[in-house]
Amino acid sequence: MSKPLLLFQAPIATRSGYGDHSRDILKSLFDLDKYEVKIVPTRWGNTPQDQIDPQTEFGQKILSNIVTQLDKQPDIFIQISVANEFKKVGKYNIGITAGVETTLAVACTRWGSTDFGFGEHYVCAENRHNDTSPTILPQQNLRTSRQT
């Protein structure tokens, strides 16, 4: 029986926290050996893309599983990114983010909802997970100048 197809989209080659976390998760997925893992590497700003060593077994496995397109919808899609970039690609979608880098979470951000269309989403930084309740700020009606 064939393994479920898992598409992993993340900044795997970057020298960044997201890149480090991506490689850790990818290594675990390879070690599980439960999925046919295919990889779509992404950039992370202007960070260097020099963290895949083609001389190692792990680096070779990453490089040999990079894809630019698939001929079928993946069973599972895992995306590591900022939440506003999440896409629904697979039959089941998992989004992983460190959250937002702010001291205020805007009122429209609903971490427990299906706003992103994902089956699961994870906020990796505990301090970000705890401060994602909306910050309520007074709103002003621009026409009447009254606060609501």
Image (cartoon, rainbow, N blue to C red):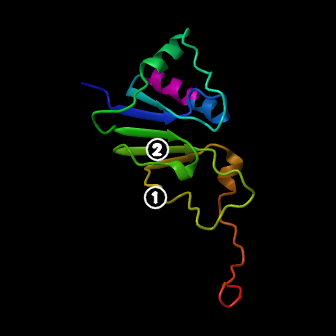
Say whether residue 22 is left or right of residue 32. Answer: right
Say whether residue 105 is left or right of residue 30. Answer: right
Residue 50: x and y in percent read 62, 21
- Please tell me whether residue 57 is drawn above or below residue 38 in the rendered image: above
Query: What residue is drawn where x is 47% and y is 27%?
Result: 29
Q: Give the SS element for disc 2.
A: strand
Asked whether the beta carbons under mark 1 and mark 2 sit within 8 Å of each other, the answer is no
Number of callouts: 2
Q: Which amino acid does label 1 sit on?
A: Thr
Q: Which of 126 and 72 is in front in this view?
A: 72
Magenta stretch secondary structure, dominant: helix
Query: What residue is drawn where x is 64% and y is 38%?
Result: 45
Q: How crowded is mark 2: few (under 14 residues within 10 Å), some or many (20 or more)?
A: many
Q: Give the SS element for disc 1.
A: loop
- Please tell me whether residue 13 is drawn above or below residue 100 in the rendered image: above
Q: Mark 2 points at which residue?
A: 94
Query: What residue is drawn where x is 46% and y is 44%?
Result: 94
Q: In which quarter of the image is residue 138?
A: bottom right
Q: Which amino acid does label 2 sit on?
A: Ile
Q: In which quarter of the image is residue 74?
A: top left
Q: In which quarter of the image is the N terminus?
A: top left
First in sequence: mark 1 vs mark 2: 2
Q: Mark 1 points at which residue?
A: 114
C-alpha gap between disc 1 and disc 2: 11 Å
Query: Looking at this rendering, what residue extends furthest in the left direction?
Result: 1
Residue 19: x and y in percent read 61, 31
Give, as a single range, the part of the protein colored magenta. 23-32
Q: Residues within 10 Å of mark 1 (few under 14, many from 20)?
A: few
Residue 98: x and y in percent read 63, 45
Q: Does the magenta stretch include residue 128?
A: no
Residue 125: x and y in percent read 67, 44
Query: Looking at this rendering, what residue extends furthest in the bottom direction?
Result: 144
